[in-house]
Amino acid sequence: MQFIDQARITVRAGRGGDGIVAFRREKYVPAGGPAGGDGGNGGNVVLEADANLQTLLDFKYKRLFPAPDGRRGGPNRCTGASGKDLLIKVPCGTEVRDHTTGILLGDLTKVGEFLVVAFGGRGGLGNAHYLSNRNRAPEKFTEGRDGEEWLLQLELKLLAEVGIIGLPNAGKSTLIAVLSAARPKIADYPFTTLVPNLGVVCRPSGDGTVFADIPGLIAGAAQGSGLGHDFLRHIERTRLLIHLLDAGAENPVEDLLVVEKELAAYGHGLVERPRLLVLNKQELLDSVRQHELVDALQAASGRELIVISAAMALGLDGLLAQVWKELGV
Ligand SMILES: Nc1nc2c(ncn2[C@@H]2O[C@H](COP(=O)(O)OP(=O)(O)OP(=O)(O)O)[C@@H](O)[C@H]2O)c(=O)[nH]1
Ligand SMILES: [Mg+2]
């Protein structure tokens, strides 16, 4: 399974309707003159950010988005109907690029924000436009223009405020499952999570904050090893990271350093992102070992350590209190 957070679509605006050649024909009006109407304009293609979408999945199967054409002009100087704009809903946070050049056309971050990605062709002119003193009965008209057509690259960076990162098997999915309604797959082998899971966690105010459970990082992730690099992209926009460590691992201090190193290697300001260091699977430790480990981890990281057990739901209130404090909510 692959997480669809990139999509390539073709948008084709409507063609303008042709102008027509027609003459006014009415009783008692001899030589009524040219009366061919103009064609209508083709519809534009517009992208709009919508709060109800979380992924670009819709674009996996449907790739071509044509807006309707403008209609031909009519007699009696009637202008043809314009093609309606085609509105395509995309999730908030969608970046839109021209696929060929890679140029960024827009970044739809807020609900309701929109971007016209292909302009409809102008309608042609009817022969009524070409009436002149020299030519009282023009046969001339113009055709509608083609609408624009572009191949677009859509890219969605998940708009989670809090990213849960760590080595495979640290318990990231277990944590998001106890904190939110998300029900990701959990298992005692690495790389259970292949795509980020989003979960909404209730804030004290009652509002929600989106947490993302990111697939496990491994050494070399920033250079593309494992699944890491793809998913480091997703946490670029989070405001806070929860770095989860497995207390049952052979050497949690080493694990800590592996992930820290990947964050630094990835760049994009990730190492400077506010971060909580959390030791999971507390119940696997006796109190002596816990003391030792906490001291060692704090010394190695220079941070306060929060100790929890996601599986036993221990220490979660304390963790969330820190999260809300860091986010200022
Ligand atoms: N003893 C104990 N086991 C836990 C705890 N939290 C998670 N686990 C177990 O650790 C294993 C891995 O948990 P996951 O939540 O799948 O870990 P993950 O970090 O999402 O792993 P990947 O998706 O592979 O990166 C599972 O067998 C969990 O049941 C905990 O607090 N205590
Ligand atoms: Mg997981």
Image (spheres, rainbow, N blue to C red):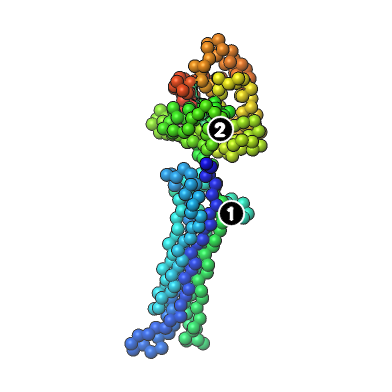
Whether residue 132 is visible, yes or no, is yes
Quadrant where the image shows the C terminus:
top left
Q: Nearer the viewer, mark 1 or mark 2?
A: 2
Whether label 2 lies within 8 Å of ligand 1 gets the answer: yes
Residue 241: percent from left, percent from top: 54, 30
Query: On residue 216, which mark appears?
Result: none
Q: Residue at x 50, y 50 (%)?
A: 60
Kind of residue sitting beneath label 1: Asp
Left or right: where 130 falls relative to 273: left
Whether residue 328 is visible, yes or no, is no
Residue 113: percent from left, percent from top: 47, 49
Position above or below: 242 against 122 = above
Left or right: where 255 falls relative to 45: right
Q: Residue at x 55, y 38 (%)?
A: 234
The answer to which of 185 and 275 lies nearer the viewer is 185
Kind of residue sitting beneath label 2: Phe
Q: Residue at x 35, y 85 (%)?
A: 26
Left or right: where 98 falls relative to 46: right
Position above or below: 127 against 246 = below
Q: What element does badge 2 sit on?
A: loop
Residue 23: percent from left, percent from top: 42, 83
Left or right: where 34 falls relative to 231: left
CA gap, disc 1 and disc 2: 33 Å
Identify the residue position indicated by label 1 in the image.
98
Give the mark nearest the N terminus, 1 or 2.
1
Residue 301: percent from left, percent from top: 62, 21
Identify the residue position indicated by label 2 in the image.
191
The answer to which of 131 and 228 lies nearer the viewer is 228
Asked where in the image residue 207 lies, by quadrant, the reply is: top left
